[in-house]
Image (cartoon, grey):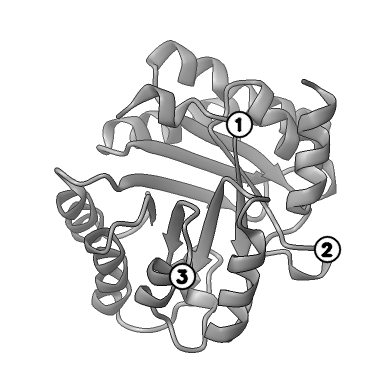
Amino acid sequence: MDSSQTRQKNICLSIAEPSLDGALVVARQAQGRADVIEIRLDLLEQPAVQPFVDAIQTPLLFTNRAQWEGGNWQGPEEERVALLVEAIERGAAYVDIELMAPEQSRSQILSAAVATKTRVIVSWHNFDETPDDETLADIFNRQRQSGADIGKMVTMAHDYSDSLRVLALQLLAAQEQFPLAAFCMGQAGKISRAATLELGGVLTYGAADRQSCTAPGQLSVDELRTIQGLVR
């Protein structure tokens, strides 16, 4: 992967609008505010790829999160993966596939992305807690060995120490030269969403506003941009 692309401090707007037209409106308005725009296909009433590719110039990340990993997709796995493959074929900048997805699903996504400009994010989420350091390191190594271009690790923080341990994964990422997005959800994890970019993280995720968050403790894109400006 092009290191200049992956080492940027990217703020990604995650869109939670259920209607296609509404999501397109939010995406258009976000151009210039966000570095990347995430289209949550699983949250759309009628999932579609092409309308966003046609209308949006900002790099697009397509995610189709399965229900078993906190998402809303309840259909067949084959259809879920097919939408992500379509995103790759239509030139998406990024697609996200879960570390815990069936091996066949991950292999299909990784194979489809070969010789394209699409970068594959292999993600892992824990909505209940932040595991111990050994478990976190094991997840990191599994992501690194999966063939991913970028790893994403997100846990629920119950106190500041959880955020510190997740942010410390950036030390491993730097040592292994593996692009990583790592931060925490929840009130105690809010600071990690901004801090990760200053500690080597390649992506953090924000909402269009406080009313349209896609995860607990998520800040808005404008709040993240303000914090980013303060530390420069």
Compared to residue 227, the image places residue 133 above or below, namely above
Disc nearer the start of the sequence (1/3): 3
Disc 1 target residue: 132
Quadrant placement of the N terminus: top left
Query: In the rendered view, does 136 fall on the left or right side of 179?
Result: right
Quick one: quadrant of the C terminus? top right
Q: Quick check: can you spot residue 112?
A: yes
Tag nearer the camera, 1 or 3? 3
> Residue 197's quadrant in the figure?
top right
Mark 2 touches mark 3? (CB < 8 Å):
no
Tell me the distance, in whole angstroms, between the alpha carbons under discs 1 and 3.
Answer: 43 Å
Tell me the residue that label 3 is attached to: 55
Neighbor class of circle 3 (other Cα within 10 Å; few <14, some 14-19, many 20+) is few
Q: Is residue 98 visible?
A: no
* Nearer to me, 169 or 46: 46
Question: Mark 2 — residue?
Answer: 210
- Which amino acid, mark 1? Asp
In terms of sequence position, does the residue under pointer 2 or pointer 3 come before the other? 3
In this rendering, the count of numbered labels is: 3
Using the image as rendered, state which of residue 116 and residue 169 is in the foreground: 116
| x and y percentages locating residue 206 in the rendered image | 69, 52
Give the residue drawn at x 33%, y 74%. Answer: 80
How far apart are the two marked residues, 1 and 2, measured between alpha carbons? 31 Å
SS for callout 2: helix
